[in-house]
Structure formats: structure tokens, C-alpha cells
Image: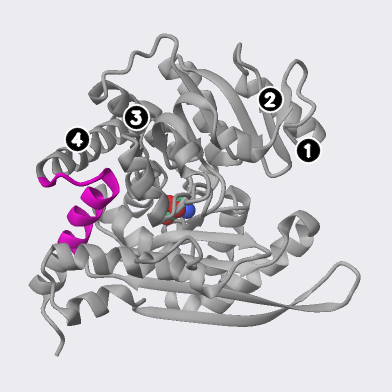
Amino acid sequence: MASDQSGPYQVAVGQVQRVGGMLGLDQGMIDLLSRPKRELTVNFPVTMDDGTIKVFTGFRVQHNFARGPCKGGIRYHPALTLDEVRALAMWMTWKCATVGLPYGGAKGGVICDPKRMSPGELERMTRRYASEIMPIIGPHVDIPAPDMYTNAQVMAWIMDTYSMNVGYSVPGIVTGKPIPLGGSKGREEATSRGLMYCVREAMAVEGLKRAGATAVVQGFGNVGWNAARLLKDELGLTITALSDSSGAILDKAGLDPVSVYEHKQRTGSVLGYPGATEISNEDLLEMECTVLVPAAMENAITSANADRVKARIVAEGANGPTTPEADLVLDEKGIMLIPDVLCNAGGVTVSYFEWVQDLQFHFWSNAQIRDRLNEIMTYAFARVYATAGAKEVDMRTAAYLLAVGEVVQATKLRGIYP
Ligand code: GLU
């Protein structure tokens, strides 16, 4: 089994091998699922504002397209590695299968520090990266979307770059675009809305009352901040602690996510929010609460802290925040973990809605988006929960059994070419 010290790709391969064994797959099939179908590394120059040329490295990895075109985000991060992108691409394959979207998985990214780049530098880097990966993306091939430190503006530049190159507008080349360019209503909050629906279902099956229930959210990017807002506004949970990369804040009486968001917009961090106490990020994860939402990076909950987690439910807003060793500890403690491939799948689900709308040039209302997302997330949760009960496994293993099983079925139906 992969350990806490393993990289994300080793963890991802370990998960497939374990579930492949449980499903009785032969070694050839396990090998096929363990490796990305296609991966591209690009090194490309960008003219910086001071006139110098800087060479950036970017990736696009397509894990599997047995069930449909590849789908997955683009991440900008200084510590990004090809192995991390491989793991994230594989997780997208399982995520799309878990919620029943007709996609395979992909992921991409550029090694860069977007916080230290000007808007012009970011635009030039994005456009050049988009041009470099153009040979392997397309609205029926591989459809990128936002991920960590990329947003609707970045998607707009990718859509424009692709469209300029082919000579006509192709809104379906990326999802997570601004609404005037063919973006979907509800995409921005979609990951968090899907998470909120999962938490609602998990609390119901666990018999937890909403009145007096509390939530702690790690990470205050798009997923974390919207999760805090929706858990408070739609489920009535009290948000007792929040964090971002600079630190964490606590207020047992309850924090107002919207006003913390405004504070962060003004000051650059959640720290210094009036009336709140500062705590460490480590303490935040170990707080007594009903729901803990890790919505930051990989490896937040490891064997080093899992036995001190006191939440009743862990709802994975991030991809891969819990290591396999920590999974075992949480399961032994009777904590329900809603795995990333289910819990944060609302984002790619509304991306799918956006793509369908773009291909049809016919757009849906906010109510239609919410109803359809609610339906898909509620059904997926019930299916994973029922499988966990029937097979006597934890929720992550249940999701993997379903997802890997479906990719295997599609692969077998298609047959091995030629
Ligand atoms: N980056 C998001 C994820 O990890 C969304 C991907 C998408 O919408 O294609 O699920």
C-alpha cells in the first residue's frame, strides 16, 4: 500500500491496484488503468513585463477516454509536478464515472507562481500554453476547466486562443468560462454546491441534526469559501473555523463567510478578521465539529494527524486531501469520509452542463442547473452509500469499486483495438 510519504501518483496507482484486486481484474487491465493514456510536457517562452524571456514548463495528461472525451482542470502552482498531474488526471476518470458523466479524466497545469505575475504575464503565459497543448485538446477530445489558481478569465483566454487558431468561436473547448462567452450559470459555486448536497445526504444517513451542527473549512479559495457560505446559508451549519494559506481563524459563535471573504479581498488573507482568534492550520484540522471540509491541497489528513480528527463527517473539497493510511484511521474511528471523487464532483458536473449547453447553443436557467446538480449528486451519494453498505467497505472504496468497474466495462465493450 502507498504510504503517507508516497507521491500522489503512487497513491493513485495503489488505489487502483487495491480495487482492481477486489474486482478480480487481470493484471493487464490493472496496468492499463494505472497508466495515463497520453501525456504531453511543453517548455515554452514567455516575454515578461521587464522584457526578459522566461521559459515555463506545462503539462497535459489524459488518463483514460474509454467512457468519452477527457475532462479536467488546469492548475497553476509553483510546486506542480508531472506525477501530481498524472494522479489528478486519474482521479478525474474515477470522478466522472462516480457521478455518471460521459467523460474520461485529464489534468493539466503550468509550473508558475501566479501570485507573483502581472495580468499581462499571466495572459501571455496562458495563451502560449494553450497553443502548445492545442494538438491534443478539442471540444470532442479533451476539455480543460479551472483548477487551483486558474479562473474564468484564464478560461476566456484559452477559449479565445483556440478559436483564433481554428478561425471560428469554439465555446465548448473549455468550461468554467465567463457567462457572456458561453459559460454556465452556477459553475463558479458548483463544486461547493455539490459538496453541500453530499453533506446534507451524509448528515441524514448518519442521523445528525442540522440545528447546532458545526463546520470547519480548510482553504478559502473558490471551493472553500463557497462551501462555507453554502453550508451556512443552505444547511444552517455554524462555521466555527476557516483558513487560507496564511493561517486559520476561529469563532465558536460562528463566522460569516461573506464578510470573511470581503476581509480577505481587502487585506489578502483571512487573518486579522475582527472578533476571531488566530489558530494554526494543524489545530483547525483537529477541531471538534460536525463536518470538516479539507478544501486546500493534497495530504492535509495523514497518519500524523488522522487519529486527532474529531469531526463526524469529512467532506473532501480538495482532490486527494486524505492519505490512504489516514483513510484507515478515520474509518476505524467511525468517521464518515465523503471521498473527493464524489464530494467535489459538482464542479465537473456543471462543467458537463456547460459543455452540453455550448454544443447545443442553448442555455439553461439557474434553477435547471441546481435541480439537475441536486439530482445527480443525491443519486451518486445514495449509490456509493449503498455500495459501501453492501460490500462492507468505506465510502472511498465503494466509489472506486463503482467507478473502476464502469471504466472496465466500457473498455471491455469497446474491445482492444485492432
Ligand atoms: N478542476 C475541477 C476538478 O478537479 C473541475 C474539472 C472540470 O470541471 O473539468 O474536479
Magenta highlight range: 391-407
Q: Residues within 10 Å of mark 3 (few under 14, many from 20)?
A: many
* Mark 4 to mark 1 CA distance (whole Å): 39 Å
What residue would you read off at disc 2?
A: 260
| Left or right of residue 133, residue 120 in this image | right
Lower position in the chain sequence, tag 2 or tag 1: 2
Q: Which residue is the site of mark 3?
A: 197
Residue positioned 76% across, 23% down in the render? 273
Three-letter amino acid code at the position of disc 2: Val
Sort mark 1 into few (<14), some (14-19) or many (20+) by Cα contacts within 10 Å. Answer: few
Tell me the residue that label 4 is attached to. Answer: 382
Residue denoted by label 1: 268
Q: Secondary structure at mark 4?
A: helix
Q: Mark 3 belongs to which amino acid?
A: Tyr
Q: Is residue 305 above or below residue 47?
A: above
Quadrant of the rendering where the N terminus is positioned? bottom left
Rendered view: 152 above or below 132: above
Q: Position of residue 55 (x, y in %)?
A: 73, 80
The quarter of the displayed image where residue 111 is located: bottom right
Q: Residues within 10 Å of mark 2 (few under 14, many from 20)?
A: many
